[in-house]
Amino acid sequence: MKIKEYFKPMKKAKKGAPLGMGFWGFMAPEVATLLYALFTMLVIFFTWINLDSPSDLLWMRLQYLSGTLLLWVVYLLWPCKAMIGARVAYLLAMLGVWYPDTYAINSQFQCLDHVFAAYEQSLFGFQPSLVFSKAYSSRVVSELMYMGYISYYLFFIVTLVIVFFQRFKDLERASFMIFASFYICYVIYVLMPVTGPQYYYLAVGVEEIAHGNFPDVGHYFKDHMEALTSPGWSGGLFYNLVDCAHHAGERPTAAFPSSHVAIATLVMLISARLRMWRWLLILAIPFVFLCLSTVYIYAHYAIDAIAGLLFGTVLFFILGGMKLGNTKKNLSLFC
């Protein structure tokens, strides 16, 4: 299809929900985002006195809503595929705001890393995150791990781009599944704060962790954001890309379940369901290293990665089987 075709008015545009999957004139992924914004607003109101700058958190949500309404109005005036793509792209851009936002809210709650680290120890007899990177510290292994970790962003971004250009009729469903999965993970992060090894190990001391001591640090991370230096070859290209990404937006939050693994798993299943076999083959090797890298670079406990695999699979079937709006179409393998 020629580029100009994406700017032609759509003949079957249905108000603001062009493929019939939305509610109240909004597309399904927009509805999922609005519901998440509403949920977090309620949490903010109920915990107002404990939050730092709660008014800023509310203002960000009002800005998001204004942007969504603006794009919706523009779409009504110019109902073309390009505008649908712009609405999805806006949701993608907002993920960069919603993720650190979980820390701004959950930092008021007690950290649960001591529970997860202790369970990790009882399950494996050691801390996989500490052992893994030391056992495989070569430059090649290090770069492969960091390559896998940074490829996470390509999983959902490039997949949505491919679906937009090649499977447009499936865009709303696929984007809904991806964004809803993000927000479900974020709800867990808000209510159940787990920072991950890179923060917890530094807070209590690596030697304490190695000796099997996992003290409760309470609200320590409300005022501390220091993390361990990432292991591996610091001169590597992918190492430095991940390091830059961490400095730009990483926070002591979002460890359980691993959204990296959960979203990547979901994307793999969506790609298989849509028969995007070439893309699935391209993702296969990065997917393996992505799952391993979450533990290798101290970002997650092993149980976080395992939970991510299970969580992504469960979300695929639940979200893929949901009826959205007036459509009966779904992406579930069971339907």
Image (spheres, rainbow, N blue to C red):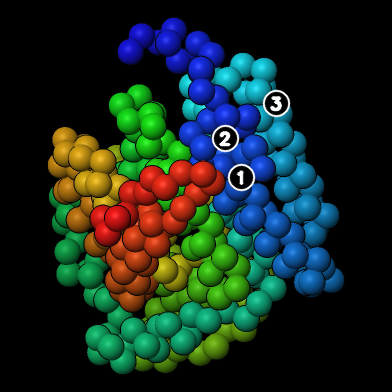
**Nearest the eye: 263 or 195:** 263
Three-letter code for the amino acid on which mark 2 is drawn: Ala
Q: Which mark is residue 73?
A: 3
- The span from disc 2 to disc 3 (Cα, nearest Å) is 12 Å
Q: Of circles 1 and 3, which is in front?
A: 1
The structure residue drawn at horizontal position 34% and vertical position 60%, both measured from the top left corner, is 317
Position of residue 14 relative to residue 37, above or below, is above
Q: Which residue is mark 1?
A: 23
Which amino acid, by three-letter code, is at mark 3?
Val
Choose mark 2 or mark 3, whichever is in front.
2
Q: Which sits earlier in the primary sequence, circle 1 or circle 3?
A: 1
- The answer to the question of whether label 2 and label 3 lie on touching residues, with beta carbons closer than 8 A, is no
- Pick whichever of labels 1 and 2 is earlier in the sequence: 2
Tag 1–tag 2 contact (CB < 8 Å): yes
Q: Amino acid at mark 1?
A: Phe
Viewer-nearest residue: 333 or 287: 333
Q: Which residue is mark 2?
A: 17
Where is residue 285 drawn, in percent x and y? Answer: 16, 48
Are the two marked residues, 1 and 3, in contact with CB atoms closer than 8 angstroms? no
